[in-house]
């Protein structure tokens, strides 16, 4: 199944198996899960979300530091 990540800092398409978690897909796409928020149709998704169909997800990088 095809997962598309898009956003200011990310733009990639990966293939994952059905019922992979969002966290697994992020890692596969070389996106560090602790640095991003992922949303679908304006709703933030937990990284534990199971992916079971092709989807396009918005990735927003969370900035922190001092």
Image: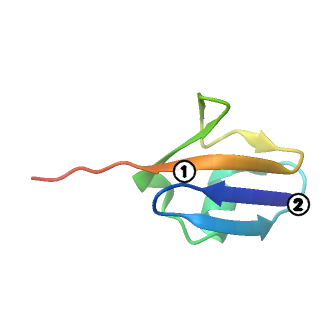
Residue at (60, 65) in percent of width and height: 11
Tell me the CA gap for discs 2 and 1: 20 Å
- Residue 60 percent across, percent down from the top left: 47, 48
Left or right for 37, reference 45: left
- Residue 3 percent across, percent down from the top left: 77, 57
How many discs appear? Answer: 2
Determine whether the residue tagged by mark 2 lies in a helix, strand or loop: loop
Which of the 4 quarters of the picture holds residue 14? Answer: bottom right
Instruction: Using the image, determine if residue 29 lies above or below residue 60.
Output: below
Q: Residues within 10 Å of mark 1 (few under 14, many from 20)?
A: many
Instruction: Using the image, determine if residue 28 lies above or below residue 22.
Output: below
Determine whether the residue tagged by mark 1 lies in a helix, strand or loop: strand
Residue at (43, 53) in percent of width and height: 34
Q: Mark 1 = which residue?
A: 59
* Dot label at residue 17: 2
> Going from the N terminus, do you reach mark 2 or mark 1 first?
2
- Image quadrant holding the N terminus, namely bottom right
**Viewer-closest of 61 and 23:** 61
- Residue 18 percent across, percent down from the top left: 90, 53
The residue mark sitting in front, 2 or 1, is 1
Instruction: Using the image, determine if residue 64 lies above or below residue 49.
Output: below
Residue at (29, 51) in percent of width and height: 63
Left or right for 53, reference 21: right
- Residue 27 percent across, percent down from the top left: 60, 65
Left or right for 36, reference 11: left
Residue that lies at the very extreme toward the left in this rendered image: 66
Task: Look at the numbered discs 2 and 1 and tell me whether their residues touch, using CB distance below 8 Å.
Answer: no
**Viewer-closest of 9 and 25:** 9
* Dot label at residue 27: none
Task: Describe the colour scheme in one phrase.
Answer: rainbow
Q: Residues within 10 Å of mark 2 (few under 14, many from 20)?
A: few
Left or right for 5, reference 37: right
């Amino acid at each position: 199944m095809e997962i598309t990540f898009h956003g200011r800092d990310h733009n990639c398409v990966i293939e994952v198996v059905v019922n992979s978690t969002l966290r697994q897909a992020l890692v596969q796409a070389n996106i560090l899960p602790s640095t991003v928020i992922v949303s679908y149709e304006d709703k933030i998704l937990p990284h534990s979300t199971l992916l079971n169909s092709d989807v396009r997800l918005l990735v927003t990088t969370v900035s922190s530091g001092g």
